[in-house]
Image (cartoon, helix red, strand yellow):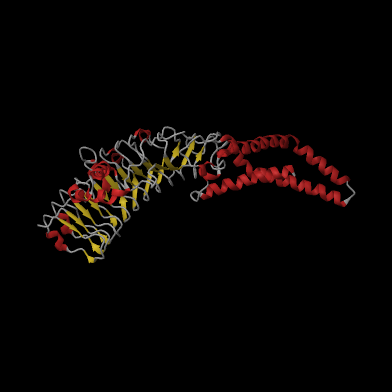
Amino acid sequence: MLQWLFLQQNQLSGEIPRQLGELEHLEELYLSKNQLIGAIPDELGQLQYLEQLLFHSNQLTAMPYVFNMSSLKVLDISRNHLSGELGRELFPQPLQVLDLSHNKFAGDIWNITDNFCALIPKGGSLKELRLNHNKLTGQIPPCLMQFERLNFLALNNNRFHGALPEIEASQLVILTLHKNALTGVLPKTLYTLAHLGVLTLHENSIGGGLEGLNLSVPCLDNSRFRMWVYWNCKRGSLIRPLLSGDELQQLDANCPRSNGACPRNGLANITLHHNRFSCAVPESLGNSEVSSLAIMGNMLGNGSLLNAPWISREEQQPFLYYSPKAWKSTMPILTGCLMLTTLAALCHQKLRRKLEEASLNLSNISEARVVASNLALMKIAACTFLLASPLLLIFGLSGKYYDCSPPLWQTTAANFSAEGWCAQFGVIVLWCAMQVLFRCILA
């Protein structure tokens, strides 16, 4: 009576035999890291005792109509060539680990989460959900962020949009949301997650401030035991003879937490770059040791020096955030612009008339040319001022560029990225026009 079939990491090719569906007492089937092609047979979906099904890292192209196993706890079909929309009734309720990452699945994420949302408790037994690196769309369902036992959620590298819902999944340790099209501000409930150790938000359009953000625990990954833990958490008997007492104790302590997403240095990890975060930077995130990327592509800072040890020294360059240096370099330009605007409005006609009279009275041709060039320079300055005046109004009067952000004139080099290049190119051109205006007037 065959219960476990481990054929992973070989060079098996061809299609998965339908005859495997006749092994009715099979509990664990590992065919990962081979060269299998074609569809996952529907017959496998009827194995009622199957608890772990691992087909990742093959070249499979089609799914069964439904996984109808009442005992299935771990399903990993990541890193294949699977595509299309997923049916709402596809996955069984007892799942604890569902990994669909690195495929080409499309459609609304609700097709995957709907059944889990209807369970009591919310999310059922699901602890780990990996949907990253697909083509899934829609807004992130609020009920997904309420799964009571969920500790690992990977939604990065998809096409999700809209604001993040309130996050009430209190057991979350790892949350990856980067490289989507998320907007809005961070929900307040994100700040209350007591176990959060990894948070990735980069390359979205999330705005607002960061005050109150908290990573209260170090990363919980244990690279030494990762493969054993990932495949055989429940079946200690398979690996117990291989470990000493101390090693077994360490394994038991890390088993539910070993998710393979932590940096090698073991620090808590957060990535915030290339969003629309702004305002003051918190001095800490609740943990003295955090690996982070936060400044690039945002508008952080309030005119003071950063006092945030969790931000790397490389990111604390004064031109990357609204630093005292940025403030000092901008304020004279704005002040001078306002002063010169006032002087130009009061004295323009009088000065032009005097220059014209002087040019008529000049007998020396070279002197006349100098006066004529000054008149031309004044015209250039006037035209440049007209071109730059919209930006001046935005800088001085528009208030906010993003939610909870400083005025546009506090924008730093870090904010300019490939996305939204038209608007940013316009800002750069108008700013350069203002620089030309001052240079012309000073000349």
Is any part of residue 127 visible from this angle? Answer: no
Q: Nearer the viewer, residue 217 or 281?
A: 217
Tell which residue pokes out farthest to the bottom in this image: 14
Up-down relation of residue 213 to residue 50 (above or below): above
Q: Quadrant of the C terminus?
A: top right
Tell which residue pokes out farthest to the left in this image: 1
Q: Quadrant of the N terminus?
A: bottom left
Up-down relation of residue 4 to residue 339 (above or below): below
Q: How many marks?
A: 0
Q: Quadrant of residue 354?
A: top right
Q: Nearer the viewer, residue 276 or 258?
A: 258
Q: Nearer the viewer, residue 208 or 433?
A: 208
Percent x, y of residue 362: 88, 47
Percent x, y of residue 4: 16, 55
Going 48% across and 42% down the picture, which residue do you hit? 312
Q: Is residue 341 left or right of residue 307?
A: right
Going 48% across and 49% down the picture, which residue do you hit? 419
Q: Is residue 301 left or right of residue 355?
A: left
Q: Nearer the viewer, residue 358 or 422?
A: 422
Going 29% across and 41% down the picture, which residue do you hit? 151
Percent x, y of residue 120: 20, 38
Is any part of residue 437 visible from this angle? Answer: yes
Q: Is residue 234 left or right of residue 143?
A: left
Percent x, y of residue 72: 18, 49
